[in-house]
Each structure stands twice: as structure tokens, then as C-alpha cells.
Image (spheres, rainbow, N blue to C red):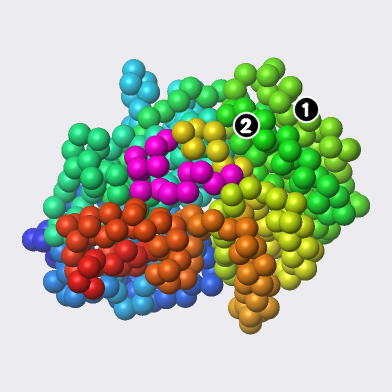
Amino acid sequence: MTTMTGAGRRLQGVILPSDPGYEAARRVWNGSIDRRPALIVRCRDAEEVAGALAYARKQELLVAVRGGGHSIPGHSVCDDGIVIDLSPMKAVEADLDRSTARAQAGVTWGEFDRATQELGLATTGGQVSTTGIAGLTLGGGVGWLMRKHGLACDNLLSVELVTADGERVTASEHENPDLFWGLRGGGGNFGIATSFEYQLNPLGPVLAGFAVHRAARAVEVLRQVRDHLAEAPDELTTFLVLFHAPPEPPFPADLQGKLVLAVAPCYAGPLEQGEQVVAPLRALGPPGLDLLQPMPYTALQTMLDASVPPGLQHYEKSDFLGELSDAAIDTIVAHSLEMTSPLSQVIVAQMGGAVRRVDMEETAFSHRDAGFFYIVAPFWTEPAEADVHVAWTRNFWEAMRPFARGVYVNFLGDEGEERVRAAYGEATYERLVALKNRFDPTNVFRLNQNIPPSNA
């Protein structure tokens, strides 16, 4: 690695295109992204972040910020600019007396969960353990515990941030409260978040896993699950996934390689009560495979990792749904049956519960009244196949537009200003623009789901 100077301090973790580690360092989770930054600075603390940012501004370099590197459109890397890489920033400090934890911005949810579960505590994270805490939280943060404990951003107590002019600030309910509001859903538009403080909640084993049904029963099962979930307690968060079963155990031979529907609940409460709540999901007719069982939350958080490894080609379209109507279910199943890659997934998840009870104006995350969201997520290995899989995804999404009501910002690709506005609604969007005018008037932080300042 090379050393350079920024803000009067020598930057130690600099990787240039000529360095041996450059090719690995520039890669991100989405294998469709192939960009070559002029340099990558692997920062160890907020001071180094400020130094890297000062160097970027002095050299007039485009700035990309990398936490976990899971940005779907690849905003965590750029061509010809600088990547401020936070991945070495791995500290997690839990306070058992206050049931809180502070974590640096390079921490992944798997790392965070392991640290907090040692104390019997947790907060809402994502569905994949390799996702970074930073991007997920700043966009809102849906996950397995959201109906019980709210979104990741609802459990956020404070954020430490390096602003565009290099100032290090704290945002919380008591310090810079307007900025704190915007950081809970507004993404990376206002600075580089270097650490997060979360409220933790007691959590022992969860009742989770999945029951797998043949695709021929998908419409029937989805309707029955939807009806059951209408009365579901907050402790139950349920994901529904259409995918091709892997050609290996524990999937039985008659399911291997076939399109299936997995009902994947997480009951975060007393296990005895959970068995009663989940029982109707088991009574939908015998599943082809039943792996619903008590498990540590850390096991649940890694359950889907193998299905979304880094390096696959990827594209994505998504929206919130007001309800999961019969017509929406019919559309989801019909298009899933035409899936163009055996690695692809279609995901439907129930919202509501604690997510809905947070006041709409308390955070920048919008669409708290949504009943569900869905994701069309193709994965494939050969870049030359992109047109086929992207076309399937777009056709699917267009067919679902009559049922849509806004979109989750973390599930957006490069889809333009209109779609970013749809993630917030006009009132919230204009309030975010006002914050952008204050904290980043020249749009230094524009590699994100961008909210341009008024003068842009």
C-alpha cells in the first residue's frame, strides 16, 4: 500500500491501480459492477476518513463511500475517483447496563449480531449477514425483527458523521436533531457516517427456518399465508421466497432444481407461543420440506448467505405494496414461473407491526403504512446473459405497477430522480433537499440514491 497526505495527515491505507491488492479491493458484492477508481483509501477511524475526504476535495475527485459494499447499483465504487473504504473499521462496543451498542461503519450485520448476541441482545438488521450496518441503517433497515422492534433506523440512538467540509459531528435526538431525522432513511446524502449507536433488545432463540412447497401450489399457499398474516402478532415477521431448490440435501430429490416457494417466518418471542403462531403455516398442506425450528438469531441471519454469494451478476426491481391482493399474487406467481435464471429469487415480505406505529414524520423513511414489499432479484454468472435476465425483471416489475405504492430506497438501482422521489414522497423529499443544502450544498456525496441540492 502507498501513503499520501490529506488534511495534513499521512493516509496509510492507500491502494493504487499498480498495487497488488487493487483488483480485490475494487470488487463489490454485485458482480455486474466493474469500475476502476484512481485510488482506494482503507480508513481505520474518523480522522482518517476526514483526511481522505480532504484529499478528494483538494484533487476534485469523485467520492464513493464503501461500508459493506452491498449497494445494488454499485455506488460504493467509482471510475477514476476515490473510494473511501470503511471496511477496516470493525469495533463493536456493547453496554449491557444501558442495552446499547456502538459500532463502527465497517461492521457487517453478522459481526454486529455475534457481538450483541453474546449478551442475549439484538437489534433489527438485514436478511444477509454480510450486509454492512451503515448502508442498511441509513436507508431505513428492514429485517427479521422489524415487526417486533421496528426498522434498524428506529433503533438508532446516534450517528457520528464526517460532513462535506470535513467537520466531525454527532447527530441524535438532542444534537443536530434535523440531521438525525434525515440520516434515518435519507441514505448517504449528508456525510460519511463513521459510527452508529443502537438500542438493543433482549432476544434468545427464535423460531425460524422455512417450509418449502412446490411451485404448483404457490398461488394457494400465498393466499393462505396472507390470510393468516392478517392476524399475526408483532413477534412474527415472515418472508416468502420463490426460488429454484439447490440440487443437494436437505432438499429431497423430487424438489432439487425445481422452482419452489419457501415460507420463512421468524418468531421473536417465547418459543411455546411461537409454535402455536407458526402452526397454521405448517397446516397449509404438507410441505415438501419442513425446516422450521428453534435456532439462534445468528443462525437465522446467515441462513440466506449461501444463496447470495459475492461476485454473481445481479439486477433488481422492487416496490412496496398496500396489500397482497389475489391479483398481485397471481401476477407474482405467473412471472416467477418464467424465471430466466435458476439462481434468481422473488421475495415478498410482510411489513406492519412496530414499523407502522412509528410516526410518519419521525424519520425520513417513508411508506410505513405499506402492507408488504416485493423484490425481483435475478442472479446469473455470465455477463453476456444480462439482457435476458434484465428484461424478465423489468417485465415483472411493469406487471406489478398497478399494485405498487412507493419503493424502499435500499432496493433501488440507478433508476433516476423520479424513483428516488417515490421512495420518500414530496413533503419528505423537500425536507431532505433542505438538509442537503445545509450539509452538502455542492453535492460531494452524490454516489448514492441522490437528493441533489437546490442549486445543482
Above-or-below relation of 391 to 148: below
Asked if residue 90 shows in the view, the reply is no
Give the residue at x 32% y 64%: 451
Image location (x, y in percent) of residue 61: 23, 74
Above-or-below relation of 81 to 127: below
Q: Secondary structure at mark 2?
A: strand
**Residue 369 forms part of the magenta stretch:** yes
Q: Which residue is mark 2?
A: 236
Image location (x, y in percent) of residue 95: 33, 24
Image location (x, y in percent) of residue 348: 65, 50
Pick the front one: 25 or 338: 338
* Rendered-image quadrant of the N terminus: bottom left
Amino acid type for the residue under numbered disc 2:
Leu
Q: Which residue is mark 1?
A: 279
Q: Residues within 10 Å of mark 1 (few under 14, many from 20)?
A: few
Image location (x, y in percent) of residue 166: 15, 57
Q: Is residue 4 left or right of residue 394?
A: left
Pick the front one: 440 or 244: 440
Q: Secondary structure at mark 1?
A: helix
Give the residue at x 57% y 64%: 317
**Residue 253 forms part of the magenta stretch:** no
Q: Is residue 147 left or right of residue 455?
A: right
* Rendered-image quadrant of the C terminus: bottom left
The stretch of residues the image draws in magenta is: 358-373
Q: Calculate the distance from the C-alpha at mark 2 to the C-alpha at mark 1.
A: 12 Å
Above-or-below relation of 137 to 297: below
Residue found farthest to the right? 254
Give the residue at x 48% y 44%: 368
